[in-house]
Image: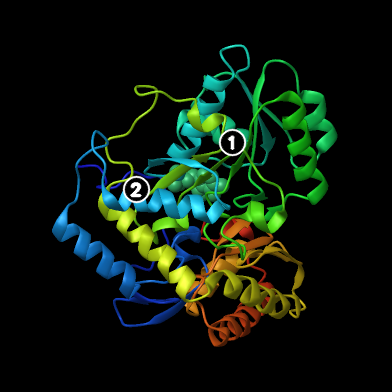
Amino acid sequence: MSSSPLMNTYKRASVDFVRGEGEFLYDANGRRYIDLLSGIAVVSVGHANARVAQAISEQASRLVHVSNLFGTIPMKRLAQRLQASTGGWGSVFFCNSGAEANECAIKLARKAGGGKRYKILASEGGFHGRTLGTLAATGQPEKWRGFEPLPEGFVHRPYNDLEAFTAAIDDSVAAIFVEPIQGERGVIPGTPQFLRGLRELCDRAKIPLIFDEVQTGVARTGSWWAFQTLGVKPDIMTSAKGIANGLPLGACIADEPYASVFKPGDHGTTFGGGPVVCAAALAVFDEIEERGLLAEAARKGEIFADLLRSLDSVQEVRGAGLMRGVVLRQPIAFGVVSAGLERGLVLNATSDNVLRMVPPLVISEDSLAEAVGTLQGVIADVASKGISPQSSPSAPAW
Ligand SMILES: Cc1ncc(COP(=O)(O)O)c(C=O)c1O
């Protein structure tokens, strides 16, 4: 018998989507779903966004690929837009995913460390990707199993524990590498004291502070970057997910002196920064600016958080903008995800009591209210049926 056409890496839900529009997804029967996940914080300016679709189609009919041995106008324009979005700093290396952007950041820090400084100090519970390097940076030992030995030189300390990070600094540490808000761990924001303290530690040790903004970036928290929302500037940051609305694009963005560390031959990629994905990302930047989505993500994020907090079944709502972790009073989050899908809601759970909400930034207030109303009923139903996390067909989407 032949093996399955797809490798068994994801426990996929029973629904196949065939079409999307804004914050809505549709299945083959024409059934409408409100998407509170955006393909895991990716479809930032909405499904089937007309401007993005047009940019992709125009660029695809003009020029699709030349390799990084040559420049293209979309890539150069996008690098300038990224620089403007940080407030004027940052040279960019384009790649194809969040993991690759983080690989670039790790290599940059190690090269800057000159061989003596090589350790990457990262956080317990952090998530940085599935390549061997980013898996080693990921502070979740359960994900390492079966893949050891991982690359050496990654050290983990508890997130938001400044003392533990301080104690781990020595001459062998090349960088501190954290998410400004831990996404996959359940939307856990870095505290101002912690993030400011990391900045000071890096300044004292003369090593880069690296923020993984793969999930938090591109307007998700109400600023272009979460570092602006949280008020602590990194030396290097990484982006992917929402940057091209679903096309594969990653970026590692570094300030001086790290921006000048790589020389030709140090790092590379065949596809990274291709004209079609960059054209899509430029359209995303235009959409965010013209539709005022930075302010809208902040404003609607507050409305959404207040609506969620009003539910008796909700213990806590954390996060910023349209990146929210909803802590349920009961450990039924996976059951809620499955039951929610049956009721037309696309949800995600990061643990048995936390739902992660990352809807498209263009979601309307009406859809937020409708979604929270439906969610209330779904939680009540699941709680009354006593669905256990184990009995849920859904699994966390990493
Ligand atoms: C914070 C963070 N970093 C890195 C990654 C990995 O990105 P990718 O799946 O594009 O490699 C993710 C993906 O979920 C993420 O949330």
Question: Which quadrant of the figure contains the N terminus?
Answer: top left
Query: What element does badge 1 sit on?
Result: loop
Is 389 displayed left or right of 34 in the figure? right
Q: Which residue is mark 1?
A: 138
Mark 2 vs 1, N-terminal side: 2
Q: Amino acid at mark 1?
A: Thr
Q: Residue at x 37, y 60 (%)?
A: 282
Is 219 displayed left or right of 274 in the figure? right
Judge whether 311 appears above or below 224 on screen.
below
Circles 2 and 1: CB atoms closer than 8 Å = no
CA–CA distance between discs 2 and 1?
A: 31 Å
Q: Nearer the viewer, mark 2 or mark 1?
A: 2
The answer to which image quadrant residue 234 occupies is top right
Q: Residue at x 77, y 78 (%)?
A: 312
Q: Name the residue at the left extreme.
A: 61
Numbered tag placed on residue 350 in the rendering:
none
Q: Residue at x 28, y 51 (%)?
A: 73
Is 71 displayed left or right of 78 in the figure? left
Q: Position of residue 38 (x, y in %)?
A: 47, 65
Q: Which residue is mark 2?
A: 76
Q: Residue at x 55, y 63 (%)?
A: 219
| Residue 17 appears in view | no
